[in-house]
Amino acid sequence: MNILYITDTGRGIEHWRDEFAKADSSLTIYGLDDSYDPLEIDVVLAWKPPSGIFPTLKNLKLTHSLGMGVDHIIKCPDLLRDVPIARIIDTDMSVQMSEYSLYGTLTAFRKFHIYQKQQAQNEWRPRSRNFHEDFKIGILGLGELGSAVAASLYQNGFTNLRGWSKSQKSISGIQSFAGDENLEEFATGLDVLICLLPLTKETIHILNLDLFAKLNEGAYLINPARGEHLVEEDLITALDKGYLSGALLDVFTQEPLPEDHPFWQDSRIELTPHIAAETNPRTASEQVIQNIQRVKENLPALNLIDLSKEY
């Protein structure tokens, strides 16, 4: 079968070629710069695909995201919506996201972000400590990543956990809230807010001033989901008002973050360049190859998304 690799940068194709060659030499991966026949492409591996390509793929059988999220594919204006779309569900990505979220949580719990600012001002000032059982952590999104992050936090002693999702979930060790009508109750009094939601029409700009005002004074925000979840101006306002004491951000409305963006120079905000959970071809290729084999056998791919839900 013939696979077309489409990304916004073109990077990473050699890693995927190496993994595919180990598993099945009959699979051929083309990049956009290679010479290929669009009519012979069976599967697309995509990350932020540009417009103009999908309409040429008349015999496409599957579009496969190169990550857990699919909003970057759904945004493509000429996406072939009658072709199934699958996403990657990878335990390695869950581990990475758990590490990232634990780092941010420990930063807030031990007040390292506050001590970092004090160091810059030559200020020696011990602060009162937090206690695990009293430290309230809320996770927006209880899917694969949210559930993994919750389990990791619980294992590290953070037992005062809440989760919010579109539908009610039952997860050991976490108090579950569901629906817009319960979002305020979920957020009230939180010390840390972690966003792990898929990006949809319903979740865009969910991280806003109204939500921040419900948190415990001086709370901490962690957003490794999508930049469009956050109203960026509201974050600055929330920090200025004391609703938040700091934030750890991995994703932004515009990436790369423009050099003149105010986040760069704000000592209350810690930035990382969209690295919280990167796709690892070594671990993810097996399920992608499995889906390609299922397509070859006229079977439905695994981890298909529901376009009406946008995830």
Image: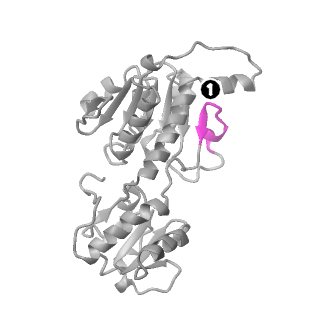
Q: Is residue 94 above or below residue 76?
A: above
Q: Is residue 78 above or below residue 102?
A: below
Residue that mark 1 sits on? 112
Residue 23, horizontal then vertical, whole percent: 42, 73
Q: Residue at x 22, y 71 (%)?
A: 299
Q: Residue at x 25, y 33 (%)?
A: 178
Locate residue 169 relative to residue 9 in the image: left or right: left
Residue at far right of view: 122
Instruction: Tell me if I can see residue 66 in this picture.
Output: no
Looking at the figure, which quarter contains the N terminus?
bottom left
Residue 256, horizontal then vertical, whole percent: 58, 53
Locate residue 205 relative to residue 267 in the image: left or right: left
Residue 66, horizontal then vertical, whole percent: 43, 62
Of 133 and 32, which appears nearest the observer?
133
Q: Give amino acid for label 1.
A: Phe
In terms of image quadrants, where is residue 262? top right
Residue 59, horizontal then vertical, whole percent: 30, 81
As helix, strand or loop, the secondary structure at mark 1 comes to: helix
Q: Is residue 109 above or below residue 97?
A: above
Q: Residue at x 37, y 48 (%)?
A: 199
Q: Residue at x 35, y 74 (%)?
A: 43
User: Where does the magenta region start and end?
Assistant: 261-271
Asked if residue 1 is among those painted magenta in the image, a careful observer would answer no
Q: Is residue 121 above or below residue 169?
A: above
Q: How many other residues sit within 10 Å of disc 1, few (<14), some (14-19) or many (≥20)? A: few
Instruction: Tell me if I can see residue 304 in this picture.
Output: yes
Of 198 and 158, which appears nearest the observer?
158
